[in-house]
Image: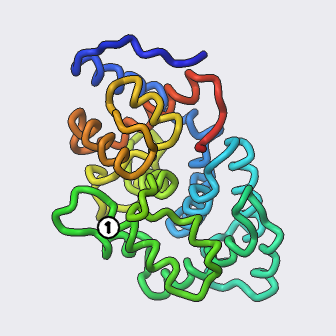
Amino acid sequence: MKYHCPMPLTRPELRELLEEKYDRYCRSDFLTDDPILIPHMFENRRDREISGLIAATIAWGQRPTIIRNAKKAMHLMGYEPHRFVMEHSELELDGLRHFVHRTFNGDDLIHFILALRNIYQHHDSLENVFLSGMAGTDLTMRPALMHFKQAFFSIPHQVRTEKHVADPSKGSSAKRLNMFLRWMVRDDGRGVDLGLWKHISPAVLSCPLDVHSGRVARQLGLLERKQDDWKAVEELDAALRSFDPNDPVKYDFALFGMGVFEHGRATAGK
């Protein structure tokens, strides 16, 4: 059943609707068939970072397929992603070559492993890379996202792999990276988002905009821009911050839930 917005809504009614849908969808059973299930499989912080980044990176298409392939990647790493990143042998690395999820292939996964090793060797954590790219007065993660991509591809790599890490300076909505950041930064107290990173405020996070959340946001009058690009992300962020400036990205659950679960689809992106 397609979600239909009872328009027009007053601002108090709109906020009430968003809060209601957030409360409905940000629950532990959300983990059952969402890619965030993957980092929840681990206890170690770095295992969660690595598995989360890989799961978020391949999070487009049918969600069961995303989860199956993310689990396959973890299996290939012996379900020890941090150990694998830091201590893999050439034979173990070569074992990744046959991995494939849509256009993300084994060569891409191998670069992710080598890039992550480089980051842990030189920055100690993924959070530090994003922190070092944050602009002091900028209320978005845009400069941090661009800095992360620069750091991620600072070692030799195939050009084809660059398309799997978004760059908002080129107009990308950076949906999957923004989703990863939501997982790492938000501590919802409900056992869904992980809240591992303590030095980045949820207030600066951006909504992981995709076709589902974008469609619902336009139906609700939160977004006018037609394209799901970075300008649309900024427009939607401004609208959501007007309802909760401290944790605007929590409404991703509301928009995504209305767009997917109330639209009868089981996908996680374009």
Image position of 156 with respect to 49: above or below: below
Which amino acid is tagged 1? Answer: Pro
Image position of 81 with respect to 13: above or below: below
How many numbered tags mark residues here?
1
Residue at horizontal 44 percent and vertical 75 percent from the top: 125
**Quarter of the image where one finds residue 30:** top right
Residue marked by disc 1: 143
Q: Could you tell me if residue 47 is visible in this image? A: no
Pinpoint residue 154: horizontal percent, then vertical percent.
Answer: 49, 85
Q: Which residue of the protein is positioned furthest toward the front in this rendering?
A: 226
Residue at horizontal 40 percent and vertical 54 percent from the top: 195
Q: Camera-side residue: 199 or 265?
A: 265
Pinpoint residue 102: horizontal percent, then vertical percent.
Answer: 74, 56
Placement of the C terminus among the 4 image quadrants? top right
Residue at horizontal 18 percent and vertical 68 percent from the top: 136
Placement of the N terminus among the 4 image quadrants? top right
**Quarter of the image where one finds residue 201:** bottom left
Q: Camera-side residue: 37 or 215?
A: 215
Residue at horizontal 47 percent and vertical 15 percent from the top: 4
Pinpoint residue 24: horizontal percent, then vertical percent.
Answer: 46, 25
**Quarter of the image where one finds residue 109:** bottom right
Q: Which residue of the protein is positioned furthest toward the left in this rendering?
A: 137
Image position of 50 with respect to 87: above or below: above
| Label 1 crowd (10 A; few <14 / some 14-19 / many >=20) | some
Pinpoint residue 63: horizontal percent, then vertical percent.
Answer: 67, 42
